[in-house]
Amino acid sequence: MLVTGKQILDHANENGYAVGAFNVNNMEIVQAIINAAEETQSPVILQASQGALKYAGVEYISAMVKVAADNASVPVALHLDHGTDFKQIMLCLRNGFTSVMIDASKHSLDENIKITKDIVDIAHAVGVSVEAELGKIGGTEDDITVAEKDATMTDPDEAAKFVESTGLDYLAIAVGTAHGPYKGEPKLDFDRIKTIKERLNIPLVLHGSSGVPEESIKKAVANGINKINIDTDIRMSFNKGVRDFANENPDVYDPRKLLGPGREAAQAVIAEKMNMFGSAGKAWR
């Protein structure tokens, strides 16, 4: 069933667990995510980045997720990840997204507040939830690149002002993660997560979570993280599943036979994440 991001994340916030937000690019990945959610009985967020929308088209992404959600026994939200373009956010709203992210984190605090509040006012008017970002998370996400030297942690005082001024539903915070593969082990600022959670008491979002050790993920959840974004781990597992099958079966050219193993490999990783995040068994009807 298709629900809003706020419905899913408010439940996670109230019950002390996190929900995986998994990036989608094609049908097989949508199926892998939904199959894993059914297997673990987890609420789930399927999210599309700007790159995914350019590749597949907003109508295709929306239609695939809606079909999957309509046939699922678990709560499903459709989310725009790292939206930076006003027209694109409006297009997602018109095409049935139940959650959108406005990422104006590159701007000053005051400008970020202004841009975010405009989106919140519009989205809330049509019953759609809003995520925004404060602080700068390093790495590359589609067209957004933040150098390591420019990455900045989220300030708790600024976070309180930001949430109060915008009325957003959940906040992505910079606490030591980065987008893309890690060269070393990320060092998360758990005290910062806890402090921000105590100040805001709203769902908090952790970006750049692929490759973060399980112990760190669980500690982040215990300190207040409720939405965890995963993309790179899905791509890598899908890629390995396809490559392994192709290498073992060089004469096979049927795309269904080639992509099926990728879907299965991704599903296994996604189910593992759902158990790690504490969302397994938390689905409601």
Image (cartoon, rainbow, N blue to C red):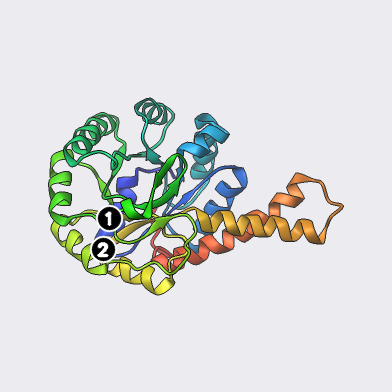
Relative to 9, 113 lies left or right: left
Please tell me how crowded label 1 is: few (under 14), some (14-19), or many (20+) other residues with Cα within 10 Å: many
Residue at position x 49%, y 53% from top? 231
Confirm or deny contact between disc 2 and disc 1 (CB under 8 A).
Answer: yes
- What is the secondary structure assignment of the residue under circle 1? strand
Residue 178 in view, yes or no: yes
- What is the secondary structure assignment of the residue under circle 2? loop
Judge whether 159 appears above or below 224 on screen.
above
Relative to 135, 252 lies left or right: right
Question: 66 or 135: which is nearer to us?
Answer: 135
Give the amino acid at mark 2: Gly
The single residue placed furthest to the bottom in the displayed view is 215
Q: Quadrant of the N terminus?
A: top left
Residue at position x 20%, y 35% from top? 111
Judge whether 97 appears above or below 1 on screen.
above
Question: 131 or 232: which is nearer to us?
Answer: 232
Q: Quadrant of residue 249?
A: bottom right
Residue 35 in view, yes or no: no
Q: Quadrant of residue 239?
A: bottom right
Task: Point out the tag, 2 or 1, that comes first from the N-terminus.
Answer: 1
Residue at position x 38%, y 68% from top? 217
How many labels were placed on the picture?
Answer: 2
On the image, the x and y values in percent for residue 46 come to 46, 47
Relative to 229, 115 lies left or right: left
Give the amino acid at mark 1: Leu
Q: Which mark is residue 252?
A: none
Q: Which residue is mark 2?
A: 224
Question: 266 or 55: which is nearer to us?
Answer: 55
Q: Which residue is mark 1?
A: 204
